[in-house]
Image (spheres, rainbow, N blue to C red):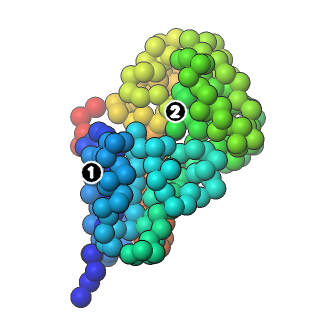
Amino acid sequence: MTTLRRAAVLGHPVRHSLSPLLHRAAYDALALDDWRYDAVDVTEDELAGFLAGMDATWAGLSLTMPLKQSVMPLLDHVEPLAQVVGSVNTVLVQGRGAGRVLTGANTDVHGLVAALGEAGVTGGVRSAAVIGAGATAASALAALAQLGCATPRVYVRSPARAGGLLRAAHRMGVEPRLGRIDDAPDEVGRVDVVVSTLPAHAADPLAAALPGEVTGVLLDVCYDPRPTALSAAWAARGGGVVGGERMLLHQAVEQVRLMTGRPAPLAAMAQALVGALASTPV
């Protein structure tokens, strides 16, 4: 008799998430027939109740916005990287009953580093820029620090709203230099790596204002539409581009490993992702 094991992605909204596709592909490849992965729409106000109501079948959770920070005080333990970054995108359910422990982890940093590695960025980054100031921007700072740059430029809409990001940077030992997004076009084309964490279409004005030539690698976390205006403009000006779907893939690979205890089937998950994106109208 098999015992059902459950996992899910939580967020609001969450219907668009490709996490179920990726995790289910992994379960199929690993022959984990007793594992189930769903998408559940959960708001910040509903999160505590959802966590309290999980039964013994639960193995883990993936978290998307707006839950990556609000979940932290609800957990029994937060792994050091997630604590420093100030963002949890993975919850591991360990033990059962009164001994159950909820542990928060961050696989976004792993996803960013692995995705940039596909473009040949494996270390020695001397200059970098991050566009945006949210939870993913904090993960980007950690990833860039791992790759060698601890003094990136960070472009935000309002410096007054970047307090959370600056506190996370201080915990990491990173010293970002703040600038306004309006100033980014004149500078981002000259750095080694740029990570845009802006939502769909928010970077379109930046794309239109880029200089005639860029030299570094851009990772645009947004992958819908594909390509984004920023990615298309960057490639047209000679820069390297990494699609945000590669970060999504690699962070999910690490989640599967953490939740199941098995090496994740990268090739099977990548194939499922490519198939899903190919069938989505551009």
- Rendered image: mark on residue 247: none
Residue at 31% in and 69% down: 55
Give the image location of residue 185, x and y in percent: 58, 15
Vertical relation: 184 (above or below) 243: above
**Residue 96 at x, y percent in the picture:** 40, 75
Foreground pick, 81 / 25: 81
x, y (%) of residue 91?
45, 58
Q: Is residue 78 toward the left or the right of residue 46 in the image? A: right
On screen, residue 132 versus residue 170, left or right, reads left
Q: Earlier in the sequence, mark 2 or mark 1?
A: 1
Residue marked by disc 1:
40
Identify the residue at image location x=61%, y=12%: 183
What residue sits 42% from the left and 21% below the top?
202
Residue occupying the point 64% across, 47% down: 84
Position of residue 268 measured from the top left corner of the image (x, y, whole percent)? 37, 62
Is 207 drawn above or below residue 16 in the view shown? above
In space, the residues marked 2 and 1 are separated at their CA atoms by 22 Å
Q: Is residue 219 visible?
A: no
Regarding mark 2 in the picture, which secondary structure is present there?
Answer: loop
Tell me, yes or no, if residue 183 can be seen here: yes
Quarter the N terminus occupies: bottom left
- Residue behind mark 2: 134
User: Is 33 situated above or below 86?
Assistant: below
| Mark 1 residue type | Val
Q: Residues within 10 Å of mark 1 (few under 14, many from 20)?
A: some
Residue at the farthest front position: 98
